[in-house]
Image (cartoon, rainbow, N blue to C red):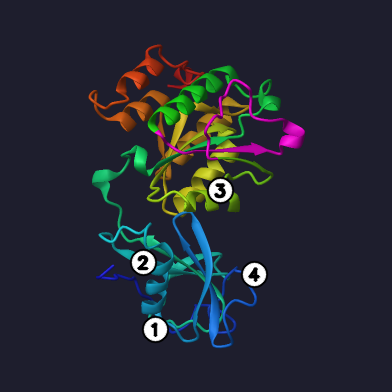
Amino acid sequence: MAEQSVCTGQGNSCPGSKSNSCVGALGGIGGIGSSSSVPVLFCFSVFARPSSVPHGSGNEVLIQKFLSLYGDQIDMHRKFVVQLFVEEWGQYIDLPKGFVVSDRCKVRLVPLQIQLTTLGNLTPASTVFFCCDMQERFRPAIKYFGDIISVGQRLLQGARILGIPVIVTEQYPKGLGSTVQELDLTGVKLVVPKTKFSMVLPEVEAALAEIPGVRSVVLFGVETHVCIQQTALDLIGRGVEVHIVADASSSRSMMDRMFALERLARNGIIITTSEAVLLQLVADKDHPKFKEIQNLIKASAPESGLLSKV
């Protein structure tokens, strides 16, 4: 962060802000700090942590606060931009030139450039598996459900072999049931119920915060055009690289499934297969776990209707 490269704009406050001060969607954090400090929500990657800074703080103070909150997560060899959430636009903008904090706000730290030479790389140390809503009540409705359950079990076995954390969600389990029995959830880091379609929940963010160096999420489950899509978009919006396992993800409609995968690919999300993921994670036949992974993929994974759309 020595270079602290930050894109700039014009003016000393948020464009369009009625109060000429920093505005955001923090909410409910009243009481943080003292009368001379201002509550700020600091967002980085998939994380969001409330804190405070002195009134009148500028770019340098914000950067130092990001370092104090996320120092173990930040790649010091990358350049970053600080962005500010503006309610009028409903999105983040580059921090305006001369900006100072005068009211509660939400800021995020975003990599200024993507290192294309590493785009798409997976390593066990920087990867988490997300298993989305593979529940009993979906069995009769989801196309090729038996196939994606079979592939999902391969992925869970591979995660255990390679020591990769797994986060599992269940959509409204009171009404839709628990994760199917064919999926062995032994050793997963978290199983969390939800009503939100995206898996990016406070409990999930807290679990990710306990895992240092997360860069990539391998995502699979149902439905591709709903929960998978919304989870993927939330994750890439936080700077996490997303790999969707096409042969372990499906929908009630093949049309919805295929259009979702096409849309997500255009948004920079990597659409891949279970075998590609597992072999990329071992990377070398001399890897000590290669034989175990090889045994998982000896029989080709079922194509789950994908070949009919090629």
Q: Closer to the camera: disc 4 or disc 3?
A: 3
Q: What amino acid is at disc 3?
A: Val
- Marking on residue 81: 2
- Marking on residue 204: 3
Inter-mark Cα distance, 2 to 3: 25 Å
Q: Would you say the magenta stretch is mainly helix, strand or loop?
A: loop
Q: Is residue 205 left or right of residue 301?
A: right
Question: On the image, numbered disc 4 is attached to which residue?
Answer: 27
Quadrant (top left, top right, bottom left, bottom right) of the N terminus: bottom left
Tell me which numbered mark, 1 or 4, is placed earlier along the sequence: 4
Q: Which residue is more in the foreground, 203 or 288?
A: 288
Question: On the image, numbered disc 1 is attached to which residue?
Answer: 98
Inter-mark Cα distance, 1 to 2: 15 Å
Q: Closer to the camera: disc 2 or disc 4?
A: 4
Q: Closer to the camera: disc 3 or disc 1?
A: 3
Q: Tell whether position 172 is magenta.
A: yes
Q: Are marks 2 and 4 in contact (CB under 8 Å)?
A: no
Q: Quadrant of residue 173?
A: top right
Inter-mark Cα distance, 1 to 4: 25 Å
Q: Secondary structure under badge 3?
A: helix
